[in-house]
Amino acid sequence: MDPEATRRVERVPHGGCTDPTITDFSANVNPEVPTGVTRVYEEALAASKRYPADDYAAYRSVAGEYVGCEPRGVVPTPGGLAGIRLAIGAFVEPGDSVLVPYPSFGEYEREVELQGARVERVPHDAVLAADPADHAMAIVCNPNNPTGTAYDPDELLDLLERCRATDTVLLVDEAFLGFTDRPSLAGREGAVVARSLTKLFGLPGLRAGFLAASDPFADRLERARPAWNLGTPAAEVGAHCMRQESFVEETRERVASERNRMAAALAERYEVHPSEAPFLLLDVADPGVDRVLSALRAAEITARDARSFRGLDSHLRVAVRLPEENDRLLDVLLDV
């Protein structure tokens, strides 16, 4: 990390509400969690009087099966963002250039700048066609946040091939890919995949995730990661969640059904961006972001003000939650 950058790089706004009386549509988190989580957590907490085994063998094994790569290619991290920081820190040097999509997750730019590197912005819908030459890294968010765009697997593989040809690391943030049935790039030569377990499994406060790569990238990332960087409860609960295939399938079906229902209803009033993620991006120029947010607050609901994303000036992002909660949101949005 570049010490000089820490003097000037600002923090990035995010969704999320800590008030339990507010229905939170600002954070894209599954409102349901797998069965058995409390039991697993309590057992792991009892084991937390000792340091965790730093090889995280069981966690790596389950994660490798979960995304389809060798366990040795899995690098445990306390959440997806920690993995993104680790990857950028391992492969990007001060003065390097990094291709970063927009509008997209704001932490990419922040982490690149903290390394003392230069951000080369590219529209999110043109990132797969970008030329990776002369860039240390190219970043893709799949599906993209906040638009919900999921990229064609063949086009993504074509970008990866071009990145390999130019010695450019391809960092793919798959934080929301688990909500889809699209294939992961985990374990592909030349790619580093960042995965988060906290969104799909409804446990953002647990902070569990991992990077997936093949050698020599996996070896470099493993050397760079901090020791004991995943607590025992996070490792045990994370492994338990990744084994819950029925929960994942039921979540995908519910989210897809509710997302389609919400999009159809909202399209009568707003421009709705096509999405394969557990959220929808709405252009609310009429009646306006502030007016809509005020109406939602009056109904004890919060949504994400998407004006903090580069290139968006009249948008809201709303999560897909449970049907009865979604109905409340629709009632407000269609009545503003």
Image (cartoon, rainbow, N blue to C red):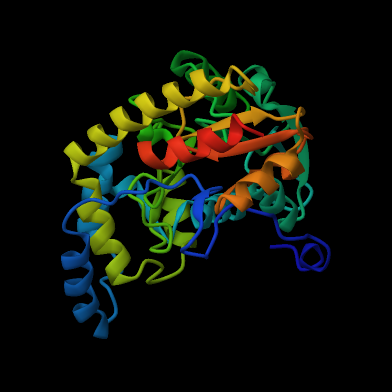
Taking the image as shown, residue 13 lies to the left or right of residue 205, namely right
Residue at (26, 40) in percent of width and height: 66
Quadrant for the N terminus, please.
Answer: bottom right
Which of the 4 image quarters holds residue 140? Answer: top right
- Number of numbered discs present? 0
Residue at (44, 56) in percent of width and height: 79
Residue at (27, 47) in percent of width and height: 63
Q: In this view, does 38 lie above or below 173?
A: below
Name the residue at the front extreme: 335
Taking the image as shown, residue 299 lies to the left or right of residue 241, namely right
Q: Can residue 322 be seen in this view?
A: no
Residue 119: horizontal and vertical position, in percent?
A: 76, 41
Decide which of 130, 105 is in the foreground and name it.
105
Decide which of 168, 283 is in the foreground and name it.
283
Quadrant for the C terminus, please.
Answer: top right
Name the residue at the bottom extreme: 49
Residue at (48, 20) in percent of width and height: 157
Q: Is residue 280 above or below residue 157?
A: below
Taking the image as shown, residue 254 lies to the left or right of residue 29, namely left
Residue 222: horizontal and vertical position, in percent?
A: 42, 57
Which of the 4 image quarters holds residue 162? Answer: top right
Taking the image as shown, residue 13 lies to the left or right of residue 232, namely right
Residue 35: horizontal and vertical position, in percent?
A: 18, 53
Residue 273: horizontal and vertical position, in percent?
A: 60, 22
Q: Can residue 292 be seen in this view?
A: yes
